[in-house]
Amino acid sequence: MSDIVIRVAHLGKCYRIRHQRPEPYVALRDAVADRVRSLWRRSPDAAGGPPSVEDFWALNDVSFEVRRGEVVGVIGRNGAGKSTLLKVLSRITEPTRGRVELDGNVASLLEVGTGFHPELTGRENIFLNGAILGMSRVEIRRKFDEIVAFAEIDRFLDTPVKRYSSGMYVRLAFAVAAHLEPEILIVDEVLAVGDAQFQKKCLGKMGDVAKAGRTVLFVSHNMAAVASLCTRALVLRAGAVELDDRPEVAIRTYLNDMSDAGRTTLEGVPRKGTGRARFTGFHLEDDRGVITTSIQSGDDVRLVFDFECEEGSIGRPFDVGFGIHGAYDECLFVLYASYVGTPLTVSQTRGRFVCRIPRFPLSPGTYSVVPRIEINAVEADFPQVPVGTIEVVDGDFFGSKVRTNARGAGPFLVDGAWSVES
């Protein structure tokens, strides 16, 4: 028997997008007059003209294979084609071209409440969803108690699921899909609906499924989960497979793709200061010097500030720093070269200041950067708006391969050593 359970060859999915030309504003009197005149027209023209049509390839020549027992992550930016790929694999939609071969029964969890009937109770939907997944009534009865215990909805088991919250929906849906022993489990980002404790249970369950020799295809924007759970990962970009490699390599490629060129120019930015030196650009680099705007918690990063200055400032003592601001423009921390005892002098009128931060200590979120230059303790340039942003995603900050889920617990990640003493 072949060890390949998923084989995708030259897969493509095309959607036709219709663009209706916008209709101009028409007063009521004009609409009535046009309607009267149209009674004598043989073929009246449409107000907005005929719609235009374009082909959009959500998937374009996608090919890969998955072996039995592999846990494969699928990552990429929004619109890269991840959900479309899973819908084709789950037989929800037909491909436009190419071929998909699946060796085994498939359970998929793509949207909250997929396969549920809102008027039926949780108990009835377990049997309904199990039957849709191809399980016999005997198999469902055998796993019923485990499903209910995992979903933690025993109090609401006989309540119609239309009254469930989105979190209760996804708990029950995942519990059914994971406990009915599918040979191939396909999971989309839907797990993000659940709370932190349930997400941890789900990741553990998917690990158990993989250890049992079954196959998991996992779409997620949680890079820490992909790194800890998956044995390999696909990076999709514009409907095509950009990379198929080890999770750490795929994650690095994905984060670099998120950079959107990464550089920010500072023309027209409002400033304070003498102007004897000015910031001209900003970008973020990873530990290999690759420009990016998205990093993982715990990564080594470099903040790079391009500058220009007057010739008279060459050789004078510079102090350069920046503040990192949160979502509500609150200043989280400030770091100047003088704080760490590093005097700065410039030898040319153009250059760049670089600050390396090991193990970036902020939890997932979006942060803004506001820099400042002093020459001889006199403010030379202080932009009055952020010069760039840093997008931080989940990472293995503590080196423990445990998802920290620090979001909501504060912006900072602080390492420490624990012990028990008498």
Image (cartoon, rainbow, N blue to C red):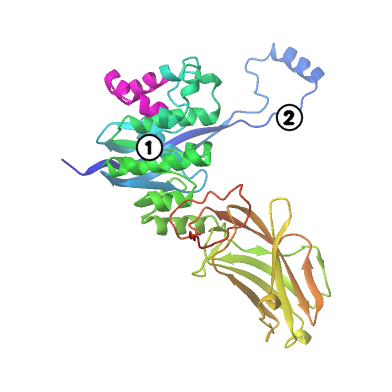
Using the image, tell me which numbered label, if any, was put on residue 186: 1
**Residue 202, how many percent across, how many down?**
42, 39
How crowded pointer 2 is (Cα within 10 Å; few <14, some 14-19, many 20+) is rated as few
**Residue 60, how many percent across, how many down?**
40, 44
Q: Secondary structure at mark 1?
A: strand
**Residue 336, how many percent across, how many down?**
70, 73
In the rendered view, tell whether residue 13 sits above or below residue 386.
above
Q: Is residue 132 magenta?
A: yes
Q: Amino acid at mark 1?
A: Ile
Q: Which residue is mark 2?
A: 24
Viewer can see residue 92: no
**Residue 37, how many percent across, how many down?**
73, 14
Q: Is residue 205 magenta?
A: no
Quadrant occupied by the N terminus = top left
- Looking at the rendering, the stretch of residues picked out in magenta corresponds to 125-148
In the rendered view, tell whether residue 61 sits above or below residue 127.
below
Viewer can see residue 375: yes
How crowded pointer 1 is (Cα within 10 Å; few <14, some 14-19, many 20+) is rated as many
Q: Secondary structure at mark 2?
A: loop
